[in-house]
Image (spheres, rainbow, N blue to C red):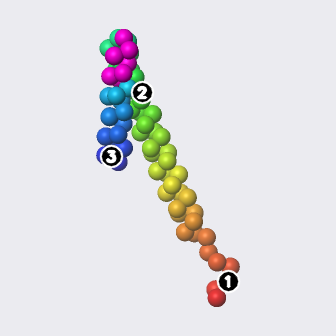
Amino acid sequence: MLGIIGLAVLVGLGAGGMALLSGYSILIALGVYALSGWLIIAAAVLVACTARSMKARAQKQGHAYSG
């Protein structure tokens, strides 16, 4: 989980820095930083939950015959 948050911080800093370099105000850069961070966290959690549920579903499938 810390890796996901760290990745979100790095992406947010990059996006905020690019917004500042593009001439946007500090308030817009802060908004871009926060929005991109939350979007990365939401996407990563969604992918992790999907992979976990698919793994559980694959393990539950039993065989019809015992032999």
| Residue 19 is one of the magenta-drawn residues | yes
Q: Residue at x 61, y 70 (%)?
A: 61
Report if the CB atoms under discs 3 and 2 are less than 8 Å apart: no
First in sequence: mark 3 vs mark 2: 3
Instruction: Using the image as rendered, state which of residue 5 and residue 10 is in the foreground.
Output: 10
- Where 66 falls versus 17 (above or below)? below
Q: Give left or right: position of 63 versus 18.
A: right
Residue 10 horizontal/vertical position (percent): 32, 34
Q: Residue at x 49, y 57 (%)?
A: 52
Mark-to-mark CA distance, 3 and 1:
43 Å
Mark-to-mark CA distance, 1 and 2:
52 Å
**Would you name the residue on which mark 3 appears?**
3
Q: Residue at x 67, y 83 (%)?
A: 65
**Would you name the residue on which mark 2 appears?**
35
What type is the residue that disc 3 sits on?
Answer: Gly
- Is label 2 in a helix, a strand or a loop? helix
**Would you name the residue on which mark 1 appears?**
65
- Where 16 falls versus 23 (above or below)? below
Q: Quadrant of residue 18?
A: top left
Q: Give left or right: position of 24 versus 57.
A: left
What type is the residue that disc 1 sits on?
Answer: Tyr
What type is the residue that disc 2 sits on?
Answer: Leu
Report if the CB atoms under discs 1 and 2 are less than 8 Å apart: no
Q: Which residues are magenta?
A: 16-23
